[in-house]
Image (cartoon, rainbow, N blue to C red):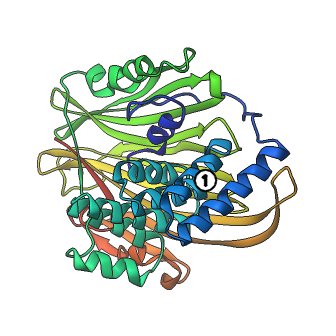
Amino acid sequence: MLASRALAIALMLGLTASFAVPDASAAPPSKRATAAQRATFKESLAAGRKAVKAKDYKTAIGKLEAALAIVPSSTSVLGELGWAYFLDGQLEAAEKRTDAAISLSMRAKQLGALHYNLGRIREAQGKKDDARSEYTESLSYRVNETVQKRVNALGGPLVTATDVAGATSFEGAVGYGPYCEAPIEKSKADGDASCTWTGTQDEALAGEGLAQVRLVQLDGHADDIGGSVDAQMLLVRHGQRWFNMGVVADSWVPGMDYITNNGEVQGFKASDLLPELPGTEVRVIERASSVDHDPGAEMTSSDMAMKWHLCGLLDGAPTCVSIAYELEWESNQLEGESWDAGKKLDGGKWAMKIDIDGGKIVIEPIGEATDLPPVAQACLGRHTFAELTKKACANTQVGR
């Protein structure tokens, strides 16, 4: 989706507002658990899991929180802790931990489970459409009968557009205060934290429709915990108003345990790609490679993902769709006290080809169509831009 993991990672960096984005230029951190801490981690995790099975959720939460204190970026512990809070009826804490797990997770199966968990939390909060959206996201990662029944009971899969408040100036659309100054001000624990936007890639567009587009680089750091993030945001201008369409590539290190994500914009084009839409459209190609050492699951995983973003003017509003069209992943057993990668546990890849032909967006499989996730399979064929915005495989963002 166009919303970025970097924004959630910022919470773990101590930047407490939702749109803080610090710098990825720092070297990978050296702060790793000692042998004694790893032993305590395993003991706490095992005790927490045992308590969940016994339905002693208060004890489970205490043990899992103790494990998380040692390895704050363990997606397994974060996910299990979020579920324990949910079972204990603490929905706000359940949402926070599950969101953090999703922001860090690199594994498709785990993401499917986490989005299902978040859907259950949303249901319990009375947020029906949000729950349907989370279940839809879950099904994009895996086929699961339980999830399918849950979303069907709510009316079927749902992909919702995110409204972005328009601004009359570029600086207002970037949101320098909300993205940088306000989060830093709220983060009293780390006096060295900072965040700035440092440069843009700018292109003026001729004709009606989108009048200008910019890729904005945001940088920052949080030295006390060794974390770093950078991000590239896509902004478009329609008339005299700028619209922030979200992050299209980011890189981050949360400050511990060798979880990293390296994202970059590999392609950028602005031209009359779709005659059905007024003016010019903007296409961005994103590539991201990630590594996740997770002692909570006794495994390490890596993946590479390619995403295709296309923005244009639809029904008078700047609109972007984002589609993951290639994914390759591998997981290995953790070995030794250093948590090095050992025996291969799982892996796979799939890919689609996206072209624009005759004013239509054409999506075809590379290899067998049955190798694609179900939501991706449903996206195959020829579509108008308007039709594509309603597909479950396409995350849609609308500037209003």
Identify which residue is drawn at 31% across, 73% down. 382
The residue furthest left is 315
Q: Which residue is mark 1?
A: 63
Closest to the observer, 256 or 270: 256
Q: Seen in the image, is 206 located left or right of residue 176?
A: left
Q: Secondary structure at mark 1?
A: helix
Question: How far across and how far down the image is residue 276, in percent?
Answer: 18, 58
Residue found farthest to the right: 336
Identify the residue shown where x is 77% and y is 42%. Answer: 33
Q: Quadrant of the C terminus?
A: top left
Q: Is 114 or 349 nearer to us in this picture?
A: 114
x, y percent for residue 88: 41, 60
Residue 377 sits in quarter: bottom left
Image: 106 above or below 177: below
Q: Residue at x 19, y 37 (%)?
A: 207
Q: Is residue 158 left or right of residue 90?
A: left
Q: State whether residue 213 appears in this view.
A: yes
- Does the rendering let one see residue 359? no
Q: Is residue 305 left or right of residue 85?
A: right
Q: Residues within 10 Å of mark 1 (few under 14, many from 20)?
A: many
- In the rendered image, residue 244, in percent from the top left (x then y), is placed at 30, 35
Name the kind of residue labelled 1 in the image.
Answer: Lys
Would you identify the image quadrant in which residue 159 lies?
Answer: bottom left
In the image, 191 versus 289, the foreground residue is: 191
Residue 222 position, x and y percent, is 58, 24
Q: Is residue 215 left or right of residue 222?
A: left
Q: As rendered, which of 37 and 396 lies closer to the eye?
A: 37
Q: Is residue 277 above or below residue 361?
A: above
